[in-house]
């Protein structure tokens, strides 16, 4: 009896935290668009890391270059709150190279769709039905990842690491923030296109910090919601996904920015097949990585330097997507983008199959020895 | 006993799920991060275990009984 009571209480506490985070994320994103961010792009981890890559000169697509303070805020918000709550845990060493490559792949998939899972939800909430195909692909990709996990896929354990290693991406974020504020001439800034559309730096940073802290507390993850539902029939994490969607939907309806349909949506294309397949890559890769791009930023802030390496992979993937003309535009996907999507999917599948195969052989050997 | 140290979500909960397949009367799981502590606790409670948590340094020992 008492157990039941305690259980109900803890569950509701975690759900409450996710609902609050959903409100914070949805409202912050809505306000950031009002303040100048591109449409339905209050937050987009893949797009913003791509913009950051451009700002650092890693690609030369002139319309998507800006050191987005939201990203720096997300990392630092998670860093500060995890320090305050005693949850800052430096760790590293769980297949960083493979994580880097998976980060590259996830970024390219997201830029074929034109958004990370978070932006997909924001697009859905604003009536962009192209994102519905993205959602179908995302769920399918998560399904693939779950099959891999249930067959024994693992990137192996991490080990405790030094404080500087764990704080690495947070320190880098502070440095970039200082450059952005004090020496912006070192960075590139778009004068037209999505990169030129930006909320004031202070607002972007403040909302980034707020969302970063909330996401750290609630463990919000867009891939984790479906994953837990599929693997352990747990609906806790998906609460956050639904909360962001509903908040975004209501805010857009009240604010008059809700626009139902496929055509003429902000920073989106209407190719249903590549919207779907791009997000299959993102879903699959996110499950193999243990979390969506937002979650990787938060984990990096908490001291997980494998996630920091993943973030670097997302940055490099964003740069590659533009250097090799893989990223879609409002006109639709590119031939290179289509080819890359298929190749990445095949490589992810090979990685999963091979890793599971090795794990099974190891297990059989251990059983034979026992 | 299951030591999930070093593994991050969702692996600790999947390892726990596998270990609890035959529903032992009691079982001990060690986790080293908060997200996994919450996940494993939630899963164990959902399938009818009572979980007591003990913090030891940077790790937690979760004792599952039913």
Image (spheres, coloured by chain):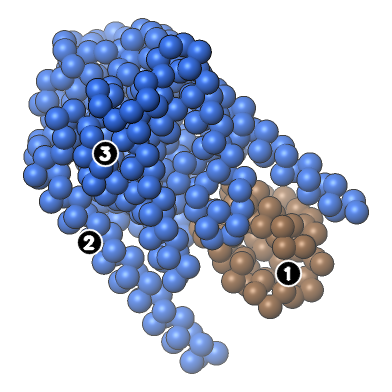
Chain colours: A blue, B brown
Residue A195 screen position, x and y as percent: 22, 18
Q: Quadrant of residue A72?
A: top left
Viewer-side residue, A67 vs A177:
A67
**Disc 2 vs disc 3: which is toward the camera?**
3
Callout 1–callout 2 Cβ contact below 8 Å: no
Q: Position of residue A163 (x, y in %)?
A: 47, 39
Q: Are marks 3 and 1 in contact (CB under 8 Å)?
A: no
Quadrant housing the C terminus of chain A = bottom right
Q: Which residue is mark 3?
A: A113
Label 3: chain? A
Label 3, label 1: how many angstroms apart (C-alpha)? 45 Å
Where does residue A107 sit, x and y in percent of width and height? 27, 41
Name the residue furthest bottom: A368
Q: In the drawing, what numbered circle is on residue B27?
A: 1
Mark 3 is surrounded, within 10 Å at the Cα level, by few (under 14), some (14 to 19) or many (20 or more) other residues, namely many
In the rendered image, residue A130, in percent from the top left (x then y), is placed at 31, 35
Tell me the chain of label 1: B
């Amino acid at each position: 009896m008492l157990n039941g009571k305690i259980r109900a209480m803890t569950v509701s506490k975690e759900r409450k935290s996710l609902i609050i985070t959903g409100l914070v994320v949805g409202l912050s994103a809505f306000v950031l668009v009002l303040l100048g961010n591109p449409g339905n792009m209050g937050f987009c981890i893949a797009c913003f890391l791509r913009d950051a890559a451009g700002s650092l000169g890693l690609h030369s697509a002139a319309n998507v270059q800006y050191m987005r303070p939201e990203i720096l805020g997300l990392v630092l918000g998670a860093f500060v709150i995890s320090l305050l709550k005693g949850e800052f845990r430096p760790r590293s060493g769980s297949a960083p190279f493979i994580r880097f490559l998976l980060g590259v792949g996830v970024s390219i998939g997201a830029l074929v769709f034109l958004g990370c899972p978070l932006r997909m939800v924001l697009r859905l909430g604003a009536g962009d039905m192209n994102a519905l195909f993205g959602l179908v692909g995302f769920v399918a990709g998560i399904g693939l990842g779950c099959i891999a996990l249930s067959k024994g896929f693992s990137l192996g354990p991490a080990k405790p690491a030094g404080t500087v290693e764990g704080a690495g991406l947070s320190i880098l974020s502070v440095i970039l923030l200082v450059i952005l504020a004090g020496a912006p001439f070192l960075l590139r800034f778009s004068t037209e296109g999505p990169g030129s559309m930006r909320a004031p730096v202070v607002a972007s940073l403040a909302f980034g910090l707020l969302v970063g802290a909330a996401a750290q507390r609630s463990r919000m993850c867009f891939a984790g919601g479906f994953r837990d539902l599929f693997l352990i029939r747990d609906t806790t994490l998906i609460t956050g996904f639904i909360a962001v969607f509903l908040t975004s939907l209501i805010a857009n309806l009240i604010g008059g920015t809700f626009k139902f349909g496929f055509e003429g949506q902000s920073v989106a294309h209407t190719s249903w097949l590549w919207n779907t397949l791009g997000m299959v890559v993102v879903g699959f890769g996110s499950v193999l990585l243990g979390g969506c791009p937002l979650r990787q930023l938060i984990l990096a802030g908490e001291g997980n330097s494998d996630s920091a390496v993943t973030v670097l992979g997302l940055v490099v993937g964003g740069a590659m997507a533009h250097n090799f003309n893989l990223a879609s535009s409002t006109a639709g996907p590119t031939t290179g983008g289509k080819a890359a999507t298929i190749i990445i999917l095949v490589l992810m599948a090979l990685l999963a199959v091979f890793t599971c195969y090795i794990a099974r052989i190891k297990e059989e050997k251990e059983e034979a020895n026992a | 006993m299951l030591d999930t140290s070093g593994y991050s979500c969702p692996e600790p909960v999947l390892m726990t799920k596998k270990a609890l397949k035959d529903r032992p009367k009691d079982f001990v799981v060690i986790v080293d991060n908060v997200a996994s502590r919450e996940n494993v606790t939630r899963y164990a409670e959902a399938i009818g275990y009572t979980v007591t948590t003990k913090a030891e340094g940077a790790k937690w020992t979760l004792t599952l009984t039913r």
